[in-house]
Image: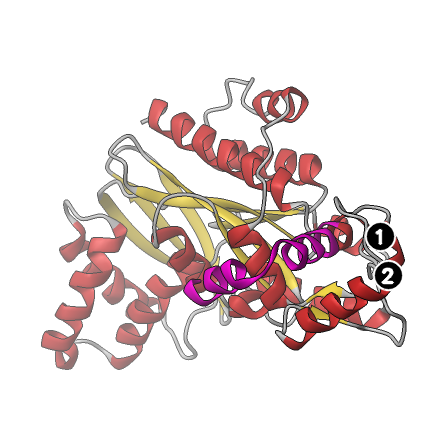
Amino acid sequence: MKDGARLLEEMNDRSREVFRRVVEGYLESGDPVGSRTLTRAMSEKVSAATIRNVMQDLEYLGLLDSPHISAGRIPTQLGLRLFVDGLLEIGDLTSGDREKIDATLGSNERDVTTVLDRVGSALSGVTHGASLVLAPKHEAPIKHIEFVSLAPDRALVVLVFADGHVENRVFLPPPGQTPSSMREAANFLNALAEGRTLSELRESMKDEIKRRRRELDVLAADLVEGGLAIWENEGERYERLIVRGRANLLDYEAEAEELDRIRSLFDDLERKRDIAEFLELAEEGEGVRIFIGSENKLFSLSGSSLVVSPYMNADRKIIGAVGVIGPTRLNYGRIVPIVDYTAQLVGRLLSDRG
């Protein structure tokens, strides 16, 4: 944020301190910070009137806002971004937080989904926010695929991987599917699948469908296209996006309108509408990233913030992400090292397990 950095440089020491103390006070209490409160905290002795003038200047710059008629101010989204990028002091991970996160990995559980679910619960408990864990894709080559019709509106797909891993998923098939069209779709995929991972198969499948669309029954083609999209984004036992700690967000004292926005956020998450957006966050680079309010459309309706970090496998390839979501007044200085440590821990865990 180059403009923000220049803005900070152009502030004098008094303006910078007033701005920093308003943001820190808001993050701690959630309440507007008034000039009289600041007169007792400032490093230099200044009058409340002087501080009010500085706060008005900061409000003119779009960094502070006055939610009520009172003289108290809160940071705007722009102000929070400026603070996070230029003034935020990141604390050290406490031994207590480290122990709670480490304890989730103390078992010999081999199922990765179960372990990640436990990590998500621990992250939610430690931060008192909601945790997000994006599980890695299973990238072993596929050995066999089979579709089984369960009802007119339900079908089962069985994925057998070369490493012995098996996934069974129930999904909604395109209307009008028959057992024969499902067999045709499975035969088509099995002919392409040998030696390919699910991601590679999806790309190869797109090319093959273009070349051989006339050879396929129309319904079978719909099933192939729709089925793989469903495998990538949904599923019960093997869901990729794990959300834990929803109740923590609803515990905050908030007005009815704010609670409605938070519920709207989780409705979107639970329907997996924007998992592609979250995937992009995980794949854009190393390190912890902070998204405030509408900076990421996944949370634009909720006025919430996301602190997220990707994790990597032994080849330093990003394969997933962990994060914490909460109100914009998150304790960023404490949350950032927790998320960073958890991401590194998950990466080492999955690397050790191959």
* Residue placed under numbered mark 1 in the picture: 39
Callout 2 touching callout 1 (CB < 8 Å): yes
Q: Amino acid at mark 2?
A: Ala
Q: In which quadrant is the N terminus drawn?
A: bottom left
Residue 165 position within the rendered picture, expressed as x and y whole percent measured from the top left? 34, 36
- Tell me if residue 128 comes above or below residue 64 in the rendering: above
- Residue 348 in percent (x, y) is at 39, 26
Taking the spot 59% from the left edge, 67% from the top edge, the residue there is 78
Q: Is residue 120 visible in this depiction of the protein?
A: yes
Label 2 sits on residue? 48
Residue 265 position, x and y percent, is: 64, 65
Pick the quarter of the image with the C terminus. top left
Marker count (numbered): 2
- Secondary structure category for the residue under label 1: helix
Which colour assignment does the render follow? secondary structure
Q: Which mark sits nearer the N-terminus, 2 or 1?
A: 1
Image coords of residue 236 (percent x, y)? 53, 51
Residues in magenta, as a range: 1-24
Q: CA distance from mark 2 to mark 1?
A: 6 Å
Q: Residue at x 26, y 74 (%)?
A: 221
Which of the two residues, 182 or 34, is positioned nearer the viewer here? 34
Q: Residue at x 70, y 36 (%)?
A: 125
- The secondary structure type at the circle numbered 2 is helix
